[in-house]
Amino acid sequence: DIQMTQSPSSLSASVGDRVTITCRASQDIRNDLHWYQQKPGKAPKRLISAASSLQSGVPSRFSGSGSGTEFTLTISSLQPEDLATYYCLQHLNVPVTFGQGTKLEIE
Amino acid sequence: EVQLVESGGGLVQPGGSLRLSCATSGFTFSPYWLHWVRQAPGKGLVWVSRISSDGIDKKYADFVKGRFTISRDNADNTLYLQMNSLRADDTAIYYCVFLYSGNWGQGTPVTVSS
């Protein structure tokens, strides 16, 4: 199974800050990686597909980069509504595996 | 608009069974592979199962193999998850996921408790 190691597990930042979340895959997954945002009590919402393709309707402050084993989700200017938990997901192989999640808090 | 609506969750005793359904609309159902993902209370997302477009190729997480069965009805645009021999650690919200488009259902809660 492909392990996805996501860091940090939690993060506190201020409005306007630049925030970076990282996922590392235990083997090469090309760009078969998604990023999801989950707000409390809600289903996950996809932000990024294919490592760097922004989902339609997602604000441009969100961006993804990386390929192979190292991936990054960046929020360029944190907004209050970005309070959520963020997950990466690899779908190169079954079982599909998720990172452990990053809980983002607003200072 | 793509919609996935799960149903069938509830409270069940250990050893019991439930059948989850996921009614879909807004996209052509039959060509796509579909997944079930679950989330235990306060925990992260965990993949459960996947089914191919024709319903023949099925994969399961190790922790549900032999207990859960995924299926689909391409005539009715519906995905299913038959869950048998349920255990307390199966307690979770179960999501139907269309991974290709990134759409998830709202989830259906399953609680296994005596």
Image (cartoon, coloured by chain):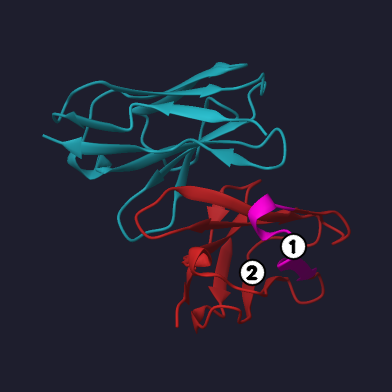
Q: Which residue is mark 1?
A: B29
For the C terminus of chain B, give its image quadrant.
Answer: bottom left
Circle nearer the N terminus (2, 1): 2
Q: State the CA–CA distance, disc 2 to disc 1.
A: 7 Å
Say which chain tag 1 marks. Answer: B
What is the three-letter code of the residue carrying label 2?
Thr
Report whether mark 2 lies on the same chain as mark 1: yes
Residue A83, image quadrant: top left
Q: Identify the residue under disc 2.
A: B24
Q: Are marks 2 and 1 in contact (CB under 8 Å)?
A: yes
Chain under label 2? B
- What's the magenta region? B60-72
Whether residue B49 is situated above or below residue A22 in the rendered picture? below
Q: Residue at x 43, y 48 (%)?
A: B44
Query: In percent of the image, x 25 and y 20: which residue is there?
Result: A18
Q: Which chain is red?
A: B
Question: Chain A shown in which color?
Answer: cyan
**Does dot 1 land on a helix, a strand or a loop?**
loop
Q: Quadrant of the N terminus of chain B?
A: bottom right
Amino acid type indicated by mark 1 = Phe
Residue shown at 66% from the left, 46% from the top: B100
